[in-house]
Amino acid sequence: MPIGEEYVPNDVVLDCDKQQIIVITGPNMSGKSALLRQTALIVLLAQMGSFVPAEAAHIGVVDKIFTRVGASDNISEGESTFMVEMLESASILNNISPRSLVLLDEIGRGTSTYDGISIAWAMVEYLHNNQQGRAKTLFATHYHELNELENMLERVKNYHVSVKEIDKSIVFLRKLVRGGTEHSFGIHVARMAGMPRGVVQRADDILANLEKVYGSGEIVPSQSMTKRSKRRVAESATESAHNIQLSMFQLDDPVLVAIRDQIKGLDINSLTPLEALNKLNEIKRITGL
């Protein structure tokens, strides 16, 4: 953590009878993963007989801590990022016990939306209904559709990490609050990362049009994406293209303006290979690469 920034503590309650699985939603960078790490480290310290950083803690015997966090691949063995995620998830589900702690972060994000939601949904159901025991689970996700599981499974509870939205900016409060949320603020994070203004504005327009068609969260895992619904997504994404066309020439960036001036009057069909290479070198020099 940055020097001078205090860690925001959060209470976590998991038991086998009323709150076995917590589904955690909330914006990117809000602290969902930190909450998972906090829980894992405190439990691990307690198992080895150490003091723990908490005002109070009641922790039983935990035989295994299972985590599926982050993204990695194993290309040398022919395993994609998603394949590695599925291998690790399968290992967790096949080895849990009633005294296991399971921490899952963004399961299903390496494939299509419908596949990803379906897998995440089925995993929560499996952990809840598993005859081998009720493993205590924290499940962080951006699939807001999983909030519906609270109404279907008695030991699943929804929580979210809160933020405060001021104008078009957000303040991360880092506090775990009861109830789910349907906002991820992904476009805001893209803006913070320095994404070109035109891309951010275009993403805002596409999101607004998609929400007109589908709402902020109407996907149900049992439904397949028909050709008609795919066409509706495409139509929503292109609806505002007549007003704001994504173009490098509309960005308020002097470097891009200089690049535009370099290529504006080019007759590509008459360029020789050497002239094309020289022009590319000039553009590279402009960008400072």
Image: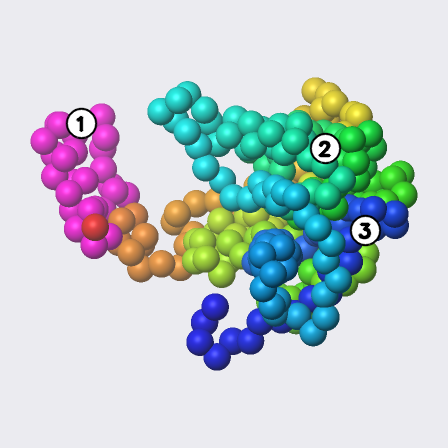
Q: Secondary structure at mark 2?
A: helix
Viewer-nearest residue: 230 or 20: 20
* Residue at (15, 43) in percent of width and height: 281
Q: Secondary structure at mark 1?
A: helix
Q: Amino acid at mark 1?
A: Ser
Q: Are marks 1 and 3 in contact (CB under 8 Å)?
A: no
Look at the image and give the residue range highlighted in magenta: 262-288
Residue 206 visible (yes or no): no
Q: Amino acid at mark 2?
A: Met
Residue 237 location, x and y as percent?
62, 38
- The Cα atoms of the two marked residues, 3 and 2, are separated by 18 Å
- The Cα atoms of the two marked residues, 2 and 1, are separated by 59 Å
Disc nearer the start of the sequence (2/1): 2
The answer to whether 278 is drawn above or below residue 14 in the figure is above
Residue beneath disc 3: 15
Which label number is shown at residue 123?
A: 2
* Residue at (45, 71) in percent of width and height: 2
The answer to whether 227 is drawn above or below residue 233 in the figure is above
* Residue at (43, 45) in percent of width and height: 247
Q: Amino acid at mark 3?
A: Asp
Disc nearer the start of the sequence (1/3): 3
- The Cα atoms of the two marked residues, 1 and 3, are separated by 73 Å
Prevailing secondary structure of the magenta residues: helix
Which label number is shown at residue 270?
A: 1
Q: Quadrant of residue 163?
A: bottom right
Disc nearer the start of the sequence (3/2): 3
